[in-house]
Image (cartoon, grey):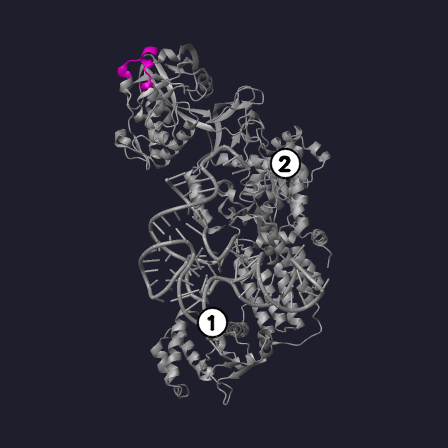
Amino acid sequence: MASSYREMEDKWQRKWSDAALYKADRDDKRPKFMLIFAYPGVTGYLHVGHMRGFSYVDAIGRYKRMTGHNVMFPVGTHATGNGAITLASRIAKKEEGIIGYMKRNGCTDDELKKLEDPLSAVWFFNDVYINHYWKKFGFLADWRRFTCTLYPDYKKFMEWQFMKLNDAKLLIQKPYYAAACPQCGPVAIDPSETDIAKGGNAETQEYTLLKFKCKDLTLVAATLRPETVYGQVNFWVNPDVEYVKMKKGGEIWVVSPAAAKKLAYQKDDCEVVGKIRGKDMVGWMCEAPMIHRTVPVFPANFCDPNVGTGLVTSVPSDAPDDWISLMDVKNDPNMISEYNLTKEQIDSAVPISIISIDGYGDFPAKDIIERMGIKRSGAPELLDAKKQVYKDGYHMGRMKDICGKFAGLRVEEAKDKMRAEMLESGEAELFNDLTEEVICRCGNQVMIKRVDDQWFINYADEALTKRTSDHCRNMQINPVEYQNNVHGVLEWFRERACVRQGNWLGTKFPFDERWTIEAISDSTLYPLYYVICMYANNKEIEPEQMTEAFFDHVVLQKGKADEVSKATGISKELLEKIRKDVQYWYPLDLNLGGKEHMTVHFPTFLFNHAAILPDDKLPRGITVNWYITGKKSKISKSKGGAQPIPGAAEMFGVDSLRLYYAHVASLFADVEWDEDIVMSYRQRLDKIITMTEELNSITDLEKSSDVDGWLISRFGTHMSIIHESMKKFDLRSLASETYFEMFNDMKWYLRRGGCNSEVIRNALKIWISAMAPITPHVAEELWSICKFKGMVSEYEYPDACPGNAGAEFGETLIRDVISDISQIIKVTKINPKRVVVYTTQSWKTKVLEIALNLADSGKLDIPTLTKMCMSDPSIREHGKAVSELAKKLAVDMSRTSNEGRRALLQLNEKEHLSSAAEFISFETGTKVEVMSADDQGIYDPQGKSKAAIPGRPAIYLE
RNA sequence: GCCGGAGUAGCCAAGCCUGGUCAAAGGCGACAGACUCAAGAUCUGUUCUUGUAGGAGUUCACCGGUUCGAAUCCGGUCUCCGGCACCA
């Protein structure tokens, strides 16, 4: 054999490549099978966790190939977005972390230099993925069909997809709020801070602006809790801040200067017309929205002009800040003198209990303050207190009776309803703001801007949802939990923004070039494009020829070939070829992806297919895989701590990894990466190789033995289980049967003295080909060691074959006898000089036969069985023992299956055990004799022989 | 809170849909033995408790129910994890 796994891998990968096994070409005589894994995003090196799902796909593809299918397994990469831009810029800036990470993964200085350009980085990683990962793992992917979302031809397909969505009236426009720099335009806010200098963790938050009427002015407070309006008792201004008067439609709003600036980005007709000091507003009375009560304006320092509008409504019952500030106002004797306040005003502000929350009293804000021991306003703990009480209120709270028609509603529900009502009546408006300050690279503050013409894909469309959901019922979706849940996910999907502006890689939106199609929306229908992209890759067609009419024709079979040919300059023959390819290969049979795709990629994948393609082109299968995790957390490629793939392949061998992935756990469970475990799989392969070499050396013996039939039967049974499991793509079961069960059977066969070279060769042929999907390199190597013809990858997968219950039962009997003898020895602590095994008296076998016949006709019960037995004189003569046995059998047989028992009738236990007596003696370490309880004059000092029943010989030892 | 998932012997992990052959696969670890100069290599056995005859007892988060029979079905409780969106 090859001296190392590495050598073995190279050798067979070369041979597969030479034989062009990976190529998937249309062949109308063979059934097709097309499968993919959800292509990975190009954001850096991948790690051993990613290979789990990828390897699964290759193994399933190989299984399908060996079971007579024409398999297409294409691969690609997803580079849309700003991942590559971020990476390139971090490299360009020589960030220590990223450079170290790149180098740890084997990137050279020369290469690093090139990666300062985003597109070069994409091409670089495309090469890494293909040549360092997938090919090295022995994937039989059709490399001619590789595609990447940034290829110009891919973009043509994407444009077409959006034209079709538009035809289906699924593209809609409506206002949307996005982060933007006043100078640089749209920016991406994410932790990598590609576009921005500060604030990568900021999120967009939706405030409700509450309007308080006060003479000719409107004081505008921003709140995240519109459901608390029934608890408003006063209004807060920061006395030290200078606010502005802003003309807004027919109203004059009062807000902080910062808020005025932000509002101008989101609302029409805003114009600052004057200023007003906070201090001057203290003591005013204003009318609160919804409750239409007049409340006083009090001073408070916690009002931050940079948050919301810088003005706050006061709900002391549920807002810790409000409670503590109100108490300050009430307890501060200087209030009246210092500000323009009256005692009546101060007394009028009494907290109102509005929400009941389990674990809190009438005033949750007060409770949390006391619980946390907060003493003064401005205390930093107030932030936590606020979060806690908001969270508890939102999830568990219910509106109290005082809240008018909203009484009794859950807070979650009341919030939406109350906001909607105030918006409707004009007492409130919406306002979006960032949760923390975000600064653009240019130094300007990033703000939320209203975008009027944002495009969405309307996944809320009822007809589309229904069609998609209905189709899912006919799909093979694994695991079954997702099959059940996917309908809910589809239902839950609403409109989804499908394009964005700013610094992103991707396809320009065909209806408006200012927009780029975003990352989820351009990776939904793409499996289809794998069928076509080969012709662009090999330059048979150019991107500019890939027009709407082209795709309409080859995918949807629209238009006449002559006309399309004339319009595109593509020959009629080629058009016809591509059209037939699509018809042949599509639909996709299996799409496998990580669990993160369950609520994002898979639904949109399904929706877009359903939106654009006819019934017979909708996907047939989805399989979800869980992760390989690091200690306690997901292995993250950005953290760099994860095992690089080439290193792992070198250390363990690719097949060990493939076997590890396939067997370590069900696909639907996270697995913690553990090198010792991987190593144990490698040892398993080592053992299998050693055993095969040993078996292969048995060539000259034609001796048959009792275990031949057993081995043949066992292997047939294993193959049956494998084929059954693979209907659900259950590779774990395949691995279990092949690498463990069959291995153990081989061991048993040899141990029992099996040595028939024909039987062995047949078994090896089955065994090695069974391995080919998961450990193809090792399988090829073993195949060639055994001098079987050709390559195992081209061989047909062994058929299922019904087992021979009789043959299998014979060995079970022997194992049971050995195990029973050992156990008796252990329990009695006897060191036996002599062991006798007594097989059953033959009349008992007759009783069993009668019982089985009765069971077949469904008439088995104790009286009937006893009666029938007693009618046979040869049985009857055994008297009471008959009725006892009948009773026992009738009871036992009603509880368990009778398959094994049936096998007993064909087995001569005495002969069978006698021929194995030597083996049993060897295994138990004592001389074992076999006798039949029927025989006269046998050695039976304790009368044990009477206890024997069919399948359960009696044992005596002394 | 809503939606979804999980809780199995020292550890990992099958089984649960389709109840009985389940003291519960397999692996790892541990222990004992064999082979070896030796071994982290390989092979064999043991690994819930208990027992001088192959048995008995108590288990599959917890409580209760259905059933002749429940790890498996039903109801409830507790704990843990993921998603709740425009982010791939």
> Does the residue at mark 1 contact the one at mark 2 (Cβ under 8 Å)?
no
Three-letter code, disc 2: Tyr
Total tally of numbered discs in the picture: 2
Q: Is residue A338 above or below residue A47?
A: above
Question: Which numbered disc, 1 or 2, marks the residue that appears first in the sequence?
Answer: 2
Looking at the rendered structure, the kind of residue marked 1 is Glu
Visible residue check, residue A29: no
Compared with A401, A4 (above or below) is below
Q: Which residues are magenta?
A: A329-345
- Relative image position of residue A368 (x, y in whole percent): 36, 31
Which class describes the residues within 10 Å of circle 1: few (<14), some (14-19), or many (20+)? few
Q: Secondary structure at mark 1?
A: helix
Place of residue A481 in the rendered image (x, y in percent of width and height, measured from the top left): 45, 49
Disc 1 and disc 2: Cα gap in Å? Answer: 60 Å
Image disc number at residue A221: none
Q: Quadrant of residue A562?
A: top right
Please identify the dominant SS of the magenta region: helix
User: Is A344 a magenta residue?
Assistant: yes
Disc 1 vs disc 2: which is toward the camera? 1
Q: Is residue A204 magenta?
A: no
Q: Is residue A536 visible?
A: yes
Residue receiving disc 2: A151
Mark 2 closeness class: few <14, some 14–19, many ≥20 residues within 10 Å: some
SS at badge 2: loop
* Residue corresponding to mark 1: A899
